[in-house]
Amino acid sequence: MPEKIKSEKLKYYAMLARVHKPLIYFLLIWPTLWALWLAANGQPSAKIVGIFIIGALLMRSAGCVLNDIIDREFDKKVTRTRNRPLAAKKIKVKEAFCVLIILLSLAGSLLFFLHRLTIFYALIGLIITSIYPFLKRITYLPQLGLGIAFSWGIPMAFAEEMGRVPLDAWLLFTVAVIWPVIYDTIYALADEKDDRKIGIKSTAILFGRWQREMIGLLQIIFLLLLSAIGVIFQLNLFYFSSLLISAFLFSYQQKLITQGDSATYFKAFVHNHWVGLVIFVGILLSYPK
């Protein structure tokens, strides 16, 4: 294979795995880190943190590849996605499957370093990831499915650090599920017209003319429930200050989505990375060194 063609293929494989959008990886990583620090009372081992971060990176890419394989016909009809490698026929489906198998194999190799209960939850997470791409065909709540998939690192983190998943962990998981519903609804706003034409469902369509209000309501609920998490885990003023900062960040996102164009929708979507970071810093500073 000529060197130029080989480098082009590698570029398309990287695009398929969304390597060119690194900030979005953090939307999956932050809830996992919240859980690791809370489950370990602020002292998770570097080894476990590393394994969970690498696992999140690999599974996020694997999920993107699977989603593109399943949605390749839909992606051709949506302005934002028509240039994705599979939709644009830059690579073959069998090549995408090879990339998917490699990513899943690498992620699976990490399980050898984890406890049996964590492995059990990881297998459930794989099933959830596999189901998610089909939800937009049958329900207006695919964002809820994404929330479950992106928050599944929470019960895994508690299983690994504590050997069990207590009720408090499930409360944190429930709270964390709301966050992707917020930011992926914002993301779906950019595709709403195309989605309506081709029959794709989303919370953006479900909320109709109340889109901004529903996003705002979910943001308020998210912060209120995180306040309850702070009380339950006895976190300090740094944590509650992080929630106040997050409220201002959400206000900025509301301002962005008011402008009503694809560029600002995507900017508001990516901006949620800072929400996750601020909350993590608040948790981090709640524990003495």
Image (cartoon, helix red, strand yellow):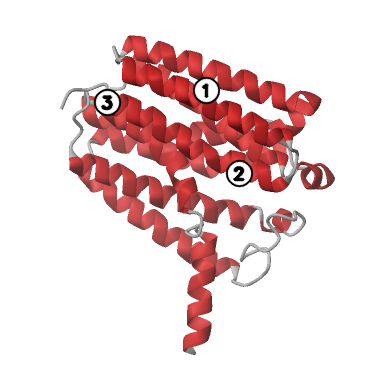
Q: Is residue 2 visible?
A: yes
What residue lies at 36% left-to-right and 14% top-to-bottom? Answer: 230
| Image-based side of 283 in relation to 73, left or right | left
**How far apart are the alpha carbons under marks 3 and 2?**
28 Å
| Image-based side of 185 in relation to 122, left or right | right
Farthest right residue? 197
Q: Label 2, on which residue?
A: 267
Q: Secondary structure at mark 1?
A: helix
Q: Is residue 11 above or below residue 177?
A: below
What residue lies at 60% left-to-right and 44% top-to-bottom? Answer: 267
CB atoms at circles 2 and 1 under 8 Å apart?
A: no
Q: Label 3, on which residue?
A: 285
Crowd tier of the residue under label 2, counting other residues whose Cα lies within 10 Å: few below 14, some 14–19, many 20 or above: some
Three-letter amino acid code at disc 2?
A: Lys
Q: Is residue 158 visible?
A: no
**How far apart are the alpha carbons under marks 2 and 1?**
17 Å
Three-letter amino acid code at disc 1?
A: Ala
Q: Report x, y in % for residue 103.
A: 41, 57
